[in-house]
Image (cartoon, rainbow, N blue to C red):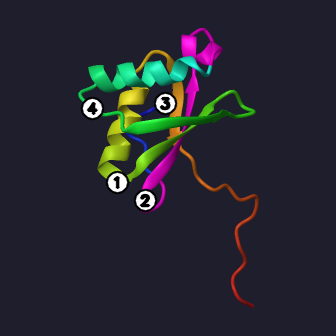
Amino acid sequence: MSGTNALPGHGPWQRFIIKFRPGSAPGRDPAAADGWLRRLDRTGGGVAPRLEWQRRLGVGADLFVASPPLGREQAQRLLDALAAERDVEYAEPDALMQAFAPRGNP
């Protein structure tokens, strides 16, 4: 994952998807992710906001919710810090995905 990816939309960003590497402790056990994120916050100079684990998704990634929502600079710092971690395969803001673009007015 590249930490230089532009954040979609105008924010704020509150939901993040983190995919841990399969061999890592949080990759094997979602309960280990909480302690992992606290360690990241202590060693990363406070880059990790309060993130609460919500659930493991069908793709094997985990959904986290930030409280309070993050502005562009703080969200980018979080994604950059996560991209630098060897236990993280990828991290991205959760965004609404649509199968089709909405139609304009006829």
Indicate the secondary structure of the residue bearing disc 2.
Answer: loop
Q: Are marks 1 and 3 in contact (CB under 8 Å)?
A: no
Which part of the image, by quadrant, shows the C terminus?
bottom right
Graded by Cα atoms within 10 Å as few (under 14), some (14 to 19) or many (20 or more), the crowding at tag 3 reads some
Residue at (28, 19) in percent of width and height: 43
Q: Distance between the residues labelled 4 and 3?
A: 21 Å
* Amino acid tagged 3: Met
* Amino acid tagged 2: Gly
Q: Mark 1 points at which residue?
A: 71
Magenta-tinted stretch: 8-29
Q: Nearer the N terminus, badge 1 or badge 4?
A: 4
Indicate the secondary structure of the residue bearing disc 3.
Answer: loop
Q: Are marks 1 and 2 in contact (CB under 8 Å)?
A: yes
Q: Position of residue 59 (x, y in %)?
A: 72, 31
* Front in this rendered view, residue 41 or 10: 41
- With respect to residue 99, does 60 lie above or below? above
Q: Nearer the N terminus, badge 1 or badge 3?
A: 3
Residue at (75, 33) in percent of width and height: 58
Residue 88 appears in the figure? yes
Q: Position of residue 28 (x, y in %)?
A: 64, 13
* Amino acid tagged 4: Gly
Q: Mark 4 points at which residue?
A: 46
Viewer-side label of 1, 4: 4
* Amino acid tagged 1: Gly
Q: Nearer the N terminus, badge 2 or badge 4?
A: 2
Q: How far apart are marks 1 and 4 (CA)?
A: 15 Å
Q: Where is residue 22 in the image (x, y as percent from the top left)?
A: 63, 14
Q: In this view, does 48 lie to the left or right of 30?
A: left
Q: Mark 2 points at which residue?
A: 11
Q: Which mark is residue 1?
A: 3
Q: Do the residues labelled 4 and 3 touch (CB within 8 Å)?
A: no
Q: Distance between the residues labelled 1 and 3?
A: 21 Å
